[in-house]
Amino acid sequence: MIDYVNKFSLAGKSAIVTGGAGLIGREIVKALAQARSRVVVADIEEEKAKHLVEELVRVGLDAQYAYFDITDMEHLQGHITGLTRRLGYIDIWVNCAYPRTSDWGKRVEEVSLESWRKNVDMHLNSYAFASKYVAEEMKARGGTIINFGSIYGVLGGDFTVYEGTEMTLPMAYAAIKGGIINLSRYLASYFGGYNIRVNSICPGGVFDNQTPVFVQNYSKKIPLKRMAQPEEIAAVVLFLASDAASYITGATIMVDGGWSAV
Ligand SMILES: NC(=O)c1ccc[n+]([C@@H]2O[C@H](COP(=O)([O-])OP(=O)(O)OC[C@H]3O[C@@H](n4cnc5c(N)ncnc54)[C@H](O)[C@@H]3O)[C@@H](O)[C@H]2O)c1
């Protein structure tokens, strides 16, 4: 009989999570480490990342930190090769970093071309080239790449959820996430023959102590009537990273409480 539970084990695998110290990233790191992979928290925020690593090592899990700036395009390939050498091999790569400019979050009327270009470069171009370089490393024995999209890479926004708040949905986010999702399909197709799986996860809004009016507006819209918790996203990464998802590639997995179903 097939050992189905064992298909979810990541024992003996090496995983790297860019943005691994963030809201969603740190839960992904915990999930992958609990499934027994060796996990590298690849983040620019050294202090937060090291704190997380200490927490995991203290309970006997295999985690380490690597300073990693996904926007450093000049050195990106070198850093990825360096990480591959350090671990021996990269089996799982998760792009969960969220690089953005300091003026991120402005309304459409206030967005400058310069800011748009910078954000596309920092987020879409960095995910694209990180994925490309990682896939090239993975050609030797296969692997899996998981890119973070968003519901807003698949759908237009519903701006009523921002009523009564200072928040908005940045226009560059739609282009960046849409680009990441279709690029993941392209890479899945191109590298499929090497047993490299490339998928996108599209979360809906994750609860992060946003203003109560926003949480209320947002929750009303969702069939499950609440925002996501980070661990509900991390559990799906764990599945996609594991052999339980061995026939899933080029997929766009919505993890949105039903937002996209209505
Ligand atoms: N939070 C949500 O509601 C939500 C919803 C849909 C999609 N997403 C996507 O999920 C991903 C993670 O989002 P989050 O909410 O955890 O973000 P976050 O801001 O909490 O964490 C992002 C992490 O990325 C790191 N980072 C920033 N710039 C970096 C760089 N240049 N190189 C390496 N690391 C860098 C930060 O230090 C931080 O630890 C993003 O791609 C985001 O677009 C988030």
Image (tube, rainbow, N blue to C red):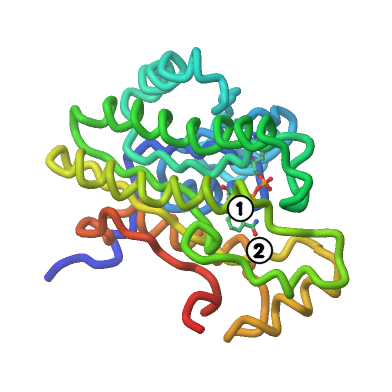
**Which residue is the extreme one toward the front?**
109
Mark 1 within 8 Å of ligand 1, using the beta carbon: yes
Name the residue that disc number 2 marks: 206
Mark 2 within 8 Å of ligand 1, using the beta carbon: yes
Q: Nearer the viewer, residue 150 or 198?
A: 150
Name the residue that disc number 1 marks: 24
Residue 60 pos. (x, y %): 54, 42
State the separation of the CA atoms marked 1 and 2.
8 Å
Residue 168 pos. (x, y %): 75, 59
Residue 129 pos. (x, y %): 41, 29
Residue 22 pos. (x, y %): 66, 45
Identity, as a three-letter code, of the amino acid under mark 1 = Ile
| Residue drawn at the location 50% of the way across and 31% of the way down | 126
Disc 1 or 2, which lies upstream in sequence? 1
| Residue drawn at the location 15% of the way across and 67% of the way down | 2
Label 1–label 2 contact, CB within 8 A: yes
**Is residue 110 found left or right of 140 in the rendered image?**
right
